[in-house]
Image (tube, helix red, strand yellow):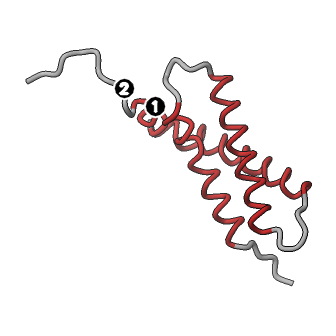
Amino acid sequence: MQPTLDAAYWIGLVISFVLPLLVGLVTTHVTHPGLKAAILLFLTAANGFLVELTNAGDDYNVSSALILWAVSFVTSVAAHFGLWKPTGAAAKAQAVGVKSSSPSAV
């Protein structure tokens, strides 16, 4: 028997990977890290429960949704600290829409 993942699970993993950037887009550098973590926790919960909802078929399994939530959160945190933060992408996401306080050189 070959284990396989349906497309909904793969899409959920990809979404988990980019959720830290989304949190960076909706927060600023001065936003408390606890609030950022709470936003990420909420978004990963939505991701986990929606993935299970789209893939449930006839029976929705809450325990599967909770497991997907945990996997989504761990994936998002790992992506943030393992890729987005070291490469500077997280800081650039938070800088989107921020006006520079220094005058530009002409």
Mark 1 — residue?
A: 94
Helix, strand or loop at mark 1? helix
Closer to us: 39 or 1: 39
Residue at the location (57% across, 36% down)? Answer: 23
* Cα distance between the residues tagged 2 and 1: 8 Å
Q: Which mark is residue 83?
A: none
From the image, which quarter does the C terminus lie in?
A: top left
Residue at the image position 80 percent from the left and 47 percent from the top: 70
Contact flag, marks 2 and 1 (Cβ < 8 Å): yes
- Residue 45 placed where, x, y %? 75, 45
Q: Residues within 10 Å of mark 2 (few under 14, many from 20)?
A: few
Quadrant of the image occupied by residue 20: top right
- Is 11 displayed left or right of 58 in the figure? left
Q: Position of residue 13 (x, y in %)?
A: 66, 58
Q: Residue furthest front?
A: 58
- As drawn, the residue found furthest toward the left would be 106
Residue at image mark 2: 98
* Camera-side residue of 44 and 71: 44
Q: Secondary structure at mark 2?
A: loop
Q: Residues within 10 Å of mark 1 (few under 14, many from 20)?
A: some
The number of discs equals 2
Residue at screen point 91% across, 55% down: 63
Residue 7 coordinates in the image, percent (x, y): 67, 72
